[in-house]
Structure formats: C-alpha cells, structure tokens
Amino acid sequence: MAVIKCAIQLNIPDTVDLKTPITLSQLCTTLKCDPCFLYRIMRFLTHRNIFKQIRIPSSEESDPLYAYAHTPLSRLLMKQGEQSMAALLLLESSPVMLAPWQNLSERVVAEGRASFEKAHGKDVWSYAEENAEHSQLINEAMACDARRTVRVMLEECKEAFEGVTSVVDVGGGNGTAMTLLRKACPWITCINFDTPHVIAAAPNSSHAIQHVPGDMFLAVPKADAAFLMWVLHDWGDEECIQILKTCKEAIPHKNGRVIIAEAVIEEEGFKDKLKDVGLMLDMVMMAHTNIGKERTLKEWEYLITQAGFSTFTLKNINSLKSIIIAFP
Ligand SMILES: C[S@@+](CC[C@H](N)C(=O)[O-])C[C@H]1O[C@@H](n2cnc3c(N)ncnc32)[C@H](O)[C@@H]1O
C-alpha cells in the first residue's frame, strides 16, 4: 500500500501515457525523480502487474531499452477518470486510517476499546466532523467507489428502481450516487441525505439533486425508495435496526422499498472469488468503526426482519456489493 501511495503521490499513473509506453528516463525527467530509486519502484510495480514493462528495439542489443505501459490495475490508480480508485487508496493509506491498525488487538480483547477511538479519542464520524480535510478524503474515497457500483447496479439490477419516482440516499456522502442515478433516470427525484457537515461541503452546482442534512437515527426525508450503500456495515446490529426502521418510516407502506448495497459474506465452505476482499473489508470495519462489520446472508435477514420488513430479495452483481431490496 505504501508503494502504491508513493506512485499516486508522484503522479506516475497519470504520467504514463495510455497509448505510448514511456521510458524510465522520460518518466524521471517529467517527474523530476532519481532514476535508481524510480527504477526500483517500477520494478516492484511491474512485478505485481501494476504497469507492464515493454522491451523497445534498440541498436545496442547488450543494453536493451525498456518502457512502461498501463495495465488494468495501474489505470485504477489514475487520479482522473471514471475508473479511478486513487482517492480510496489515499484514504486507507492516510496516517489517520493507518493509526488504528497499530492497536487492533485493543478491539479484540474482552471489554476492549475501538481501535480508531484508542488512536484518535473519538469515533471516525466525530473525527471527520472536526477535521474538514479528513472528511473530504472520506467523501472523495466513497465517491470513487460509488461511481463504479452505481454503474454496475444500473446495468445489472435496474429493476431495483422500477416504478420508483423518488429516492433518498441515506448517508449518501457528497451526492455522487444520486447525481449518477439522476443522470441515468432523469424522471426520478433524487435526494442526498447526510450529516450537516458533509452536506455543507457537498458540491451542488447542477441542482439536479436535493441535498438534505440530518441524522439517519432520527428521521430521513420521505421518498418511494431509501438507498443505503456502505452505511449499515459501519454499525452494530442495534444501530442498523434503528436506521432501517427510520428508512421504513420514510417510504410508502405499499410499493415502498429499501435498497441496500453491501457485501454479503458467504458462509463456511463456499468459495466466492470476492470472499477474500469481503473478509479484508471486515478487518477494515474492525479497525475503523466501533462495532461495524461485514455480514452473512443470515445476519442480513436478521436485521431486516427485526426492523419489521415483511420480505426481501437479494441479487449478486459484478461487484463486492450485492443488492438487497427490503419491502415493508
Ligand atoms: C461509508 S460512507 C458511505 C457513503 C456513500 N453511501 C457511498 O457508499 O459512497 C458512510 C456515510 O454515512 C454518513 N453518516 C454517518 N453517520 C450519519 C448519520 N447519523 N446520519 C446520516 N449520515 C450519516 C457519513 O457521513 C458517510 O457519508
């Protein structure tokens, strides 16, 4: 992660051309880097299939020339572009988010303390409220993930929004998901709902979506559907049931729905190619939230029924997240 952070900070992914490979000396000149150190960074990254090394025909056979080109992985590290995951990597490798990992054991011992609280004296959301720079880092990281998930969801689970004329994104961050939904489905009224400091910092240039501040534990704006993406995994069961109940109050009893985009951890014995990522994310939840966690289908079913929903559906999409739709 440190080497990837170094590559993003140096702007390597945005400097390597998408079409023409770039030589080490061109890269060094453009980025004002030391060739010996940059060579070692690039050797490591190409070994990991983050960039590929291409041999360039040269007159000196004994001294071949190499150049670097993009791979699908290195494209994710570009700061620009729809696929960019750079902001998420910068968040997770920030000193604030790395500190709690140093005391993960504090979380695990009986009657232990949350790792993030031990490191920073407060939970991640209170910390973000008091540190605008870190809050922006979180919002940008979530936005780059939201861009990918919303695109896949609209391609593979369009039925989630069938017959829906208004949606409220509960804990929607800077409004990226609702901006994309509105673009794809202009007939849907889209509301982005989050805490006051997040809403105050959210861009609102197009006025295509409404931004509403508030507290999801108390009440959320009324809409045909409430959307919860990567929100419930931040919280423990009792808190999730409370959030689901306030969402249920915001939607119509007839034809209303709560759309949940979250990972579903497979039970023992089932080999899913994304299980490793889901379990890693569960460790992230342990380090960064108080009692948040990734959940199995059984655990999701428990929350949904305890919150008073009568039924739900589950659809796997080409994402770590599945789409769960709960009906009152
Ligand atoms: C992990 S982020 C998910 C952001 C967005 N849904 C996404 O997936 O891109 C969780 C969000 O919940 C918001 N949040 C935390 N506590 C909240 C509260 N009490 N009421 C409303 N939103 C809250 C945070 O500010 C943050 O934007």
Image (cartoon, helix red, strand yellow):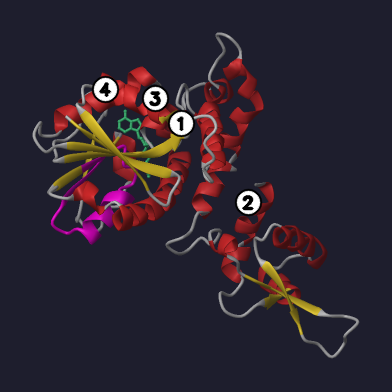
- Assign ligand 1 to one image quadrant: top left
| Mark 3 → mark 1, Cα distance in angstroms | 9 Å
For mark 3, give the secondary structure: helix
Residue 253, visible in the rendered structure: yes
Q: Where's residue 293, x and y in %?
A: 46, 27
Residue position marked by numbered label 4 in the rendering: 305
Q: What amino acid is labelled 3 in the image?
A: Glu
The tag on residue 199 is none
Can residue 178 be found in the magenta stretch? yes
Query: Which is nearer the N-term, disc 4 or disc 1?
Result: 1
| Mark 2 → mark 3, Cα distance in angstroms | 35 Å
Cβ atoms under marks 3 and 4 closer than 8 Å? no
For mark 1, give the secondary structure: loop
Of labels 2 and 3, the one closer to you = 3
Q: Is residue 32 above or below residue 193?
A: below
Residue position marked by numbered label 2 in the rendering: 5
Residue drawn at x 43%, y 29% as measured from the top left:
295
Report the span colored magenta: 168-193
* Mark 1 surroundings: few (<14), some (14-19) or many (≥20) residues within 10 A: many
Residue position marked by numbered label 3 in the rendering: 299
